[in-house]
């Protein structure tokens, strides 16, 4: 069986260079990389992560834990995972995607995987994943605010959810909208709590009364209604209340709301404006009309969460930050219009 020494000898480089080519910890020229890869292919050499782990006392793997239901990931999830995987590879790390069904998240096995650290997406109140990782001493980073009473402080990467909701409400209210319906994220997640608080504050700032009927939480992932979230709520609320604009949590709920509006014989944006918080930018431009929404930079969220975790693992010289906020920006389509324009 070929060893790293054999590859180095055949390629005419040092063992360190061969290691760098495969781990990508340090840049190597294209010519050198090609020589190493060619030599590896001729010798049928495969980098041994297990052997490296024995030497470094590291698994060279990080966990990415995402509760899921019986559905495909959204565009946000796919872009986020892509950012995590690409950034982790730069440090020579593999990513173990923890796809535990949501009902099985509360198991001791979560914190016993062969990983050096973990990234937790979508924290909830008293999140069991965070408790187990904290209890076992495994370094972790959360993407979203932590709400665990036993974990006072831990590294986080997040969007400024309060600012996002204030910006959205200010944008719609400036267009004359005062009857705003909000299809929020799942109740119990820290992102939905931040958004709910900001929604109430934003309306109060403009002296608009908050009506409970105009705010809704996405069903739990295991719920049969999860994939249909936005349709029933839109039909029911429009039938009972005056609604001039809808803020949807993600592209799926936005599309469901859009279908409901059309089935009611109403038009977007002439009758009701529609704003999506976490949408697929490519899909938003292909709908009729193109959706207005926020770019939350999911790939950057993923990349920064890896860098922050690498700081904790001693594999990256960071700037000392433990809490990183990723900027977001409003992307205008044609799904929101001024009420004055529609009169």
Image (tube, rainbow, N blue to C red):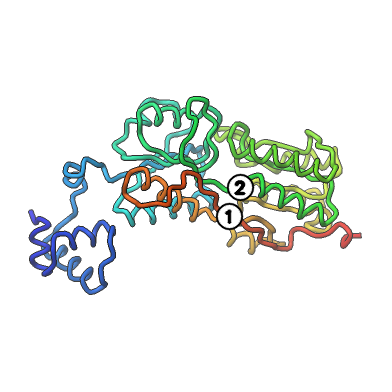
* Residue under the image location 52 percent in, 28 percent down: 148
Q: Are marks 1 and 2 in contact (CB under 8 Å)?
A: yes
Q: Which residue is mark 1?
A: 327
Residue 26 in the image: x percent, y percent?
A: 28, 61
Q: Nearer the viewer, residue 320 or 7?
A: 320
Q: Is residue 123 left or right of residue 295?
A: left
State the quadrant of the C terminus. Answer: bottom right
Residue furthest out toward the bottom: 31
- Residue 323 vs 293, above or below: the answer is above
Q: Quadrant of residue 333?
A: bottom right
In the displayed image of the protein, which residue is found farthest to the front? 320
**Which x, y percent locates residue 89?**
33, 55
In the rendered image, which residue does mark 2 sit on? 160
Q: At x 50% / y 51%, what residue is drawn?
A: 301
Number of numbered callouts drawn: 2
User: Which of 265 and 313 lies nearest the eye of the viewer?
Assistant: 313
Residue 2 placed where, x, y %?
9, 56
């Amino acid at each position: 069986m070929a060893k790293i020494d054999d590859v180095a000898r055949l390629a005419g480089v040092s063992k360190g260079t061969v290691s760098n080519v495969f781990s990508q910890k340090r840049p190597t020229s294209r010519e050198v990389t090609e020589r190493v890869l060619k030599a590896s292919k001729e010798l049928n050499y495969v980098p041994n992560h297990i052997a490296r782990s024995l030497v470094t006392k590291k698994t060279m793997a990080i966990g990415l834990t995402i509760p899921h239901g019986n559905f495909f990931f959204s565009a946000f999830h796919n872009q986020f995972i892509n950012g995590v995987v690409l950034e982790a590879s730069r440090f020579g790390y593999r990513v173990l995607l923890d796809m535990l069904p949501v009902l099985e998240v509360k198991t001791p096995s979560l914190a016993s995987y062969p990983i050096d650290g973990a990234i937790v997406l979508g924290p909830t109140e008293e999140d069991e994943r965070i408790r187990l990782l904290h209890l076992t001493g495994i370094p972790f980073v959360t993407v979203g605010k932590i709400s665990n009473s036993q974990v006072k402080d831990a590294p986080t990467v997040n969007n400024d959810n309060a600012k996002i909701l204030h910006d959205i409400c200010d944008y719609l209210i400036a267009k004359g909208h005062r009857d705003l319906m909000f299809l929020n994220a799942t109740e119990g997640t820290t992102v939905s709590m931040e958004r709910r608080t900001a929604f109430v504050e934003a309306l109060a700032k403009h002296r608009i009364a908050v009506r409970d009927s105009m705010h809704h939480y996405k069903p739990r992932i295991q719920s049969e209604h999860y994939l249909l979230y936005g349709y029933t709520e839109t039909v029911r609320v429009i039938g009972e209340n005056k609604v001039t604009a809808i803020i949807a949590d993600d592209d799926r709920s936005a599309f469901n709301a859009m279908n409901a509006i059309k089935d009611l014989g109403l038009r977007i944006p002439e009758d009701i404006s529609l704003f999506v918080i976490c949408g697929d930018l490519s899909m938003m431009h292909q709908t009729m009309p193109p959706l207005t929404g926020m770019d939350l930079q999911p790939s950057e969220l993923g990349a920064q969460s890896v860098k922050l975790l690498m700081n904790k693992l001693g594999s990256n010289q960071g700037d000392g930050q433990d809490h990183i906020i990723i900027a977001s920006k409003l992307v205008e389509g044609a799904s929101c219009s001024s009420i004055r324009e529609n009169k």
